[in-house]
Image (cartoon, rainbow, N blue to C red):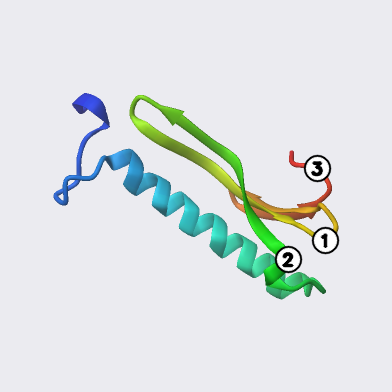
Amino acid sequence: MVINSGYSLAGNKMTSTMGLTTINRCIHMISRFIIYNNLNTKLDDFIFYEYSIKTTHWGNIINGIAFINTKNGKFLYSMGSQAKYSCTLS
């Protein structure tokens, strides 16, 4: 194991790089969910919600991201390989 989670050639912590990859995957899942389920909402109605971001001594560990609809209070979120739109986060 590398000490302190390792660093990239750019000097960034590897946990940051892995976190950006996770965010990219979650946004991709959310985008596919919006396209395939034809949500009748405006993207301006959504604001970022810190869903599953944990701060550790290695950096931020990101498991999933979410947006909340300011009009109806529903969450649009992705964790793992699926996205959901519901009143609660699971």
Q: Residue at x 50, y 32 (%)?
A: 54
The residues bearing labels 3 and 2 have C-alpha atoms spaced at a distance of 17 Å
User: What label does residue 88 carry, if any?
Assistant: 3
Q: Amino acid at mark 1?
A: Lys
Residue 71: image quadrant is bottom right
Q: Residue at x 85, y 57 (%)?
A: 72
Secondary structure state at the residue bearing disc 3: loop
Secondary structure state at the residue bearing disc 1: loop
Q: Position of residue 47 (x, y in %)?
A: 65, 57
Q: Nearer the viewer, mark 3 or mark 2?
A: 2
Q: Amino acid at mark 3?
A: Thr
Looking at the image, do the residues carrying marks 3 and 2 touch, with CB atoms under 8 Å apart? no
Determine whether, in the image, residue 23 is placed left or right of residue 9.
right
Query: Which of the two labelled residues, at mark 3 and mark 2, occupies the earlier sequence position?
Result: 2
Spot the residue most to the left: 9
Q: Residue at x 64, y 69 (%)?
A: 32
Query: Which of the two labelled residues, at mark 3 and mark 1, occupies the earlier sequence position?
Result: 1
Determine whether, in the image, residue 26 is placed left or right of residue 11.
right
Query: Which of the two labelled residues, at mark 1 and mark 2, occupies the earlier sequence position?
Result: 2
The residues bearing labels 3 and 1 have C-alpha atoms spaced at a distance of 15 Å
Tell me the quadrant of the picture where the N terminus can be found. top left
Q: Residue at x 67, y 52 (%)?
A: 77
Give the residue number, with chain letter if any, for mark 2. Answer: 45
Q: Position of residue 80 (x, y in %)?
A: 58, 47
Q: Where is 45 relative to 62, above or below?
A: below
Looking at the image, do the residues carrying marks 1 and 2 touch, with CB atoms under 8 Å apart? yes
Q: Amino acid at mark 2?
A: Asp
Q: Nearer the viewer, mark 3 or mark 1?
A: 1
The residues bearing labels 1 and 2 have C-alpha atoms spaced at a distance of 6 Å
Give the residue number, with chain letter if any, for mark 1. Answer: 71
